Image (tube, rainbow, N blue to C red):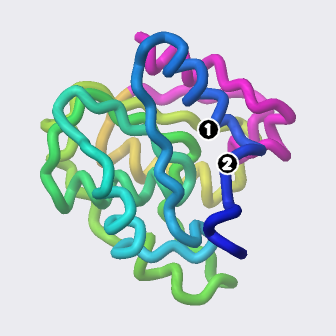
Amino acid sequence: MDLSERTYTKHWIPWIRRELNARGIPTQVPLLPEPWAPVYENFKAEFEKYPVNESTILIGHSCGGAFLVRWLGDTKQKIDTLILVAPWKIPDPDKVGRDAYYEYPIDETIKERVGRIVMFIADDEEEDGKKSVEIFHNALGGKLIELHGRGHFTMDSMRTDAFPELLDEVLA
């Protein structure tokens, strides 16, 4: 896939960016390279082009959530809020090479540097997704929000790009 053509157009990510920008909250969306075959170092190189400080709200979906938790542990960065949407932690045995991306120890001191932690899960998420959220929540605590019928929070499972519950949490 040509990276220059890849976007998040069929997703809630552009919707949340529009909603936040309309409310005067500057929002950036890094396009992380090859999320279907995530490599931490490649994500880190792209992500660190954007400023992060103690008033930053970070939102990560799926492998992006796993990335943010690892990055916050590695960098010891302080932020305002961390929101994880269906974060993934368990490597798929059918997808070779992802073990190195997902298998890292969660730095439990992250919760001392983050003002607020929120995690979203759906009641119809895959079992490994539910287990992943449990792993993150056990390590980091925070608010756990379970929504009905959202699957993995993709367009296929949500059938809409609107994610009002996420907007409510960002604005809280």
Q: In which quarter of the image is residue 24?
A: top left
Residue 96 position within the rendered picture, expressed as x and y whole percent measured from the top left = 60, 88
Q: Quadrant of the C terminus?
A: top left
Which range of residues does the magenta coloring cover?
143-172
Q: Residue sitting at 19 percent across and 62 percent down?
A: 74
Residue 134's x, y, as percent? Answer: 47, 47
The answer to whether residue 103 shows anywhere in this view is no
Quadrant in which residue 34 is drawn: bottom right
Q: Which amino acid does label 2 sit on?
A: Tyr
Does 4 sit left or right of 29 as displayed?
right
Q: Which mark is residue 8?
A: 2
| Label 1 secondary element | helix
Amino acid type at image mark 1: Ile
Above or below, 145 relative to 153: above
**What's the mark number on residue 13?**
1
Residue drawn 28% across and 32% down? 56
Any magenta on residue 163? yes
The residue nearer to you, when weighing 53 against 107, is 53
The reply to whether dot 1 and dot 2 touch (C-beta < 8 Å) is yes
